[in-house]
Amino acid sequence: MEISQQTDLPEHICKNCGHTFKGIYCNLCGEKVIEPKDRKLNSILTTVLISTTFVDNKFLKSLRLTLSNPGFLAREYVDGRRVRYMRPLQMFFILNLVYFLFPVLQMFNASLYTQLNVLPHSNLARKMVHHKVVEQGLSMQGFELIYNQETTNLAKLLVVIFVVLASVPLSLIFRKKNRFYTDHVALAVELTSFNMALNAIGLSLIFLVFSKLFHWGHFTWGTYLNDITLTLIFIATNVYFIFRAAKTFYNQKGKRLVIKAMLGVVGLFLALEAYRFVLFIVTMLSI
């Protein structure tokens, strides 16, 4: 029966490789035959929706694993098991799109006040800002408004820099013979996706709900959600990520797990501070 059905299938010449085959997929290169129904508007919209939103079941499954079992998705990817889950970089781009387009918590950003008073490079930052204010003839208040608006936009574009910076301490602390640098980058991508999903998008939704509930009591979250609070949230959630990933991705156990995980958390904190310094420099150059 199946052989008869296969024989009855129309024959096609692949537009990609020129191979002659039967069916709708070329058995040599995998190119699909475009049928009239594929050109209809509803079919195109469905394809776009699946490609760019949360409809794809792989995204939901991969995101759930990233939040519940950090390091597993990157481990599957570097070990060559890539069919059942979304690749870490694909998930990163989807979450980054949401992070860029919608008003969510700017976990990777730092206001001018934080840059000038809290971070290790604050002394240098104050000198650069003073020179810029004098040079452009601006008031400090006016410059702060311009800076905060510009750095918010740039922080959304420069998140990928944090991926690179985070991969460096991971590659040094968890250095193993069977791991390439790109493997550590894959974990850093998953880590950044974890932060965008949980600390930026997830917390924004939670705070939105709570702000609506407490609105009657004139309660606002803005007083508490400053850069220092967000940094503490970042550290707390990334302690969880690194401890789980050290076990899942790097196969660390016992005392070595605890020591290397703590070093990993310190390394990620330094990567965040380095990212904020890069963000400050880029923002200053763009003003």
Image: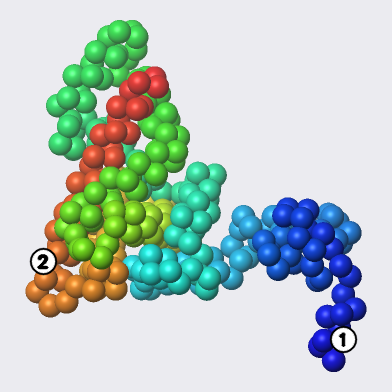
Of 256 and 24, nearer the camera is: 24
Q: Is residue 210 shown left or right of residue 188?
A: right
Q: Residue 92: where, in percent of width, then height?
A: 46, 54
Question: Disc 1 marks which residue?
Answer: 4
**Amino acid type at mark 1:** Ser
Disc 1 crowd rating (10 Å Cα; few below 14, some 14-19, many 20+) is: few
Q: Quadrant of the C terminus?
A: top left
Q: Residue furthest bottom?
A: 1
Question: Disc 2 marks which residue?
Answer: 259
Q: Quadrant of residue 77?
A: bottom left
**Amino acid type at mark 2:** Ile
Q: Is residue 87 above or below residue 225?
A: below
Residue drawn where x is 28% and y is 38% of the image: 276
Gap in angstroms between the C-alphas marked 2 and 1: 64 Å
Residue drawn where x is 82% and y is 86% of the image: 3
Disc 2 crowd rating (10 Å Cα; few below 14, some 14-19, many 20+) is: some
Helix, strand or loop at label 1? It is helix
Q: Quadrant of residue 125?
A: top left
